[in-house]
Image (spheres, rainbow, N blue to C red):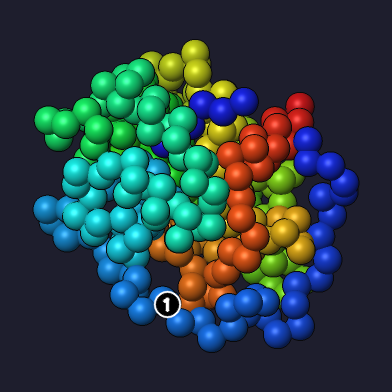
């Protein structure tokens, strides 16, 4: 799923992980919040191509059904689940409903999560965890697509000394995925793909960002993409409020690292 968005100052080098690996400061018990335990979707539940929104539904920050989701629902979920500021998802929601009219709920103020799979609206070719619509399914997680991305992110090599996804590795993985998607998909739509996949890379980094490390813990990224799960069990915490402007900063940083 792609969000159209508009440099991080200082170095992007990161320190060694905390000595009590894999726990992180502020959330050391590895327990999921009461009432927000992970549960995969049922057969009648609606999910999107966006692992971030799916994870919020899988943890009941959004309604687990994924149906009839309002902006207020998304605002509540993003604020309480990821500690985003209240306006962080506003543009994407307005884009889905007012620009593209994606809602199938019968109410233009709500969406079903699967509405976001409509191709060439918010969803674009070159997703890092979903296949292109050319191959038939742009909605569900595809391990054959994400496998090379995971390798480029270093998710198969996680240790105390190699614990984070950096802006640079995120940029490399995104660029390699786009090259491969263009190679195998003869109908690849290049019009917005660069812009939107940069946006999604910045968004997932912002969602999982460790401000002390200036990077995203690999364990958190792995759970996020492979399971649509918030990595509470791996110590996920979000101690600092993240604004829409911070997402834009990370998008710009990924863009710069791609050049």
Question: Which residue lies under the disc numbered 1?
Answer: 32
Q: Nearer the viewer, residue 206 or 140?
A: 206
Question: Can I make out residue 51 in this image?
Answer: no
Question: Can I make out residue 190 in this image?
Answer: yes
Q: Residue at x 81, y 60 (%)?
A: 14
Q: Residue at x 69, y 73 (%)?
A: 159
- Along the horizontal axis of the image, is 39 left or right of 238? left
In the rendered view, would you say 39 is above or below 121? Answer: below
Spot occupied by residue 26 in the image (x, y as percentages of width and height): 63, 77
Q: Secondary structure at mark 1?
A: loop
Q: Residue at x 45, y 82 (%)?
A: 31
Q: Residues within 10 Å of mark 1 (few under 14, many from 20)?
A: some
Q: Quadrant of the C terminus?
A: top right
Q: Nearer the viewer, residue 74 or 53?
A: 74
Spot occupied by residue 93 in the image (x, y as percentages of width and height): 38, 33
Instruction: In the displayed orientation, state which residue is furthest to the right.
Output: 10
Q: Quadrant of the N terminus?
A: top left
Q: Nearer the viewer, residue 167 or 8?
A: 8
Task: Give the mark count.
Answer: 1
Spot occupied by residue 209 in the image (x, y as percentages of width and height): 64, 56
Spot occupied by residue 16 in the image (x, y as percentages of width and height): 81, 70
């Amino acid at each position: 799923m792609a969000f159209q968005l508009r440099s991080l100052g200082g170095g992007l080098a990161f320190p060694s992980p905390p000595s009590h690996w894999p726990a992180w400061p502020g959330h050391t018990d590895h327990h999921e919040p009461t009432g927000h335990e992970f549960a995969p979707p049922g057969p009648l539940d609606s999910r999107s191509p966006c692992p971030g929104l799916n994870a919020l539904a899988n943890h009941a920050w959004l309604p687990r059904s994924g149906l009839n989701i309002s902006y207020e629902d998304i605002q509540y979920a993003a604020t309480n689940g990821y500690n985003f500021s209240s306006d962080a998802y506003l543009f994407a929601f307005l884009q889905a409903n007012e620009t593209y009219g994606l809602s199938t709920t019968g109410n233009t103020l709500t969406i079903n999560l699967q509405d976001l799979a409509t191709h060439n609206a918010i969803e674009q070719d070159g997703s890092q965890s979903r296949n292109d619509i050319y191959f038939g399914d742009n909605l569900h997680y595809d391990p054959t697509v994400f496998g090379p991305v995971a390798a480029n992110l270093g998710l198969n090599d996680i240790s105390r000394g190699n614990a984070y996804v950096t802006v640079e590795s995120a940029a490399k993985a995104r660029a390699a995925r786009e090259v491969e998607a263009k190679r195998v998909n003869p109908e690849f739509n290049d019009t917005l793909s660069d812009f939107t996949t940069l946006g999604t890379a910045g968004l997932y980094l912002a969602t999982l960002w460790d401000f002390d490390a200036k990077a995203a813990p690999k364990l958190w990224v792995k759970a996020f993409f492979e399971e649509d799960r918030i990595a509470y069990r791996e110590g996920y915490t979000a101690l600092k409020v993240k604004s829409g402007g911070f997402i834009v900063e990370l998008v710009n940083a990924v863009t710069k690292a791609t050049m």
